[in-house]
Image (tube, rainbow, N blue to C red):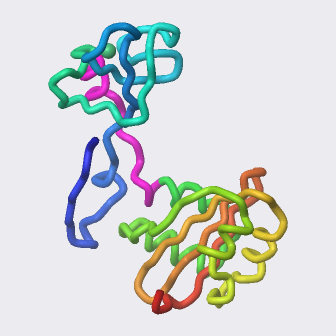
Amino acid sequence: MIVRMVCVPRDEWSFTMAREPARFGTAQVKGVSGIAHAAVDGGTLCGIPEQQITRYRHLFDPRARRACRDCRRRADAAPTRPCVQERLHNRIQEAAQGRARDDLLAALSKGAEVALWINGPSTTLTRNHARVEELTDGAGSVADALNATMSIVLACVEDGPWRFVVVLPQDGDRPLVARGPRGSH
Ligand SMILES: [Zn+2]
């Protein structure tokens, strides 16, 4: 498990420096306990096919003493992945233009905290996380989207005085961005 504890001043923060190491699940060869391999689609990074492995829920740790050497080398060489801010930034590029969207794009590129990014039934999400009644900008379209579909992806970002809510429809529709003042929650 890789835990990143990086504190940098906001004006030095960038997507490039915030990229994260590639992550893999853990697998072991059936009947061979001890050696941990990195799991990928169809098997392990070092090439052991799916039928011969058992997958585990925890992440592959290349630094672990019992990590497969070939998997370790390949995991270390794997391309880094964008941080959560960059991934959300990419998704909301397609949202309709507006102040909320533009301010959120700017906030994400400075490292604003993504407080939540979940998918699930829109009814539960509406009730617990979107808090539509507190939104002052774009609330109507977010409420409509939450009512229109059964299942949805929702992200919340907090930045300065604002709480942004992003709805990412799973049917390929444009993402929606709304915001409201940060409450006392
Ligand atoms: Zn391996």
Q: Give the answer, above or below, for where 73 lies relative to 127.
A: above
> Dominant secondary structure of the magenta stretch?
helix
Which residue is located at x 40 percent, y 71 percent?
Answer: 112
Q: How many marks?
A: 0
Tell me which segment is drawn in magenta. 71-86
Rendered location of residue 68, percent (x, y): 25, 17
Is residue 25 covered in magenta?
no
Which residue is located at x 81 percent, y 61 percent?
Answer: 149
Rendered location of residue 38, percent (x, y): 36, 24
- Front in this rendered view, residue 139 or 26: 26
For the N terminus, the image quarter is: top left
Q: Give the answer, above or below, for where 18 lies relative to 137.
A: above
Rendered location of residue 95, percent (x, y): 67, 65
- Front in this rendered view, residue 117 or 51: 51
Which residue is located at x 78 percent, y 51 percent?
Answer: 171
Left or right of 130 in this view: 149: right
Of the four image quadrants, the one with ligand 1 is top left
Which residue is located at x 41 percent, y 48 percent?
Answer: 82
Rendered location of residue 80, percent (x, y): 35, 39
Residue that extends furthest to the right in the rendered view of this protein? 148
Q: Quadrant of residue 91?
A: bottom right
Q: Quadrant of residue 107?
A: bottom left
Q: Give the answer, above or below, for where 6 lies relative to 185.
A: above
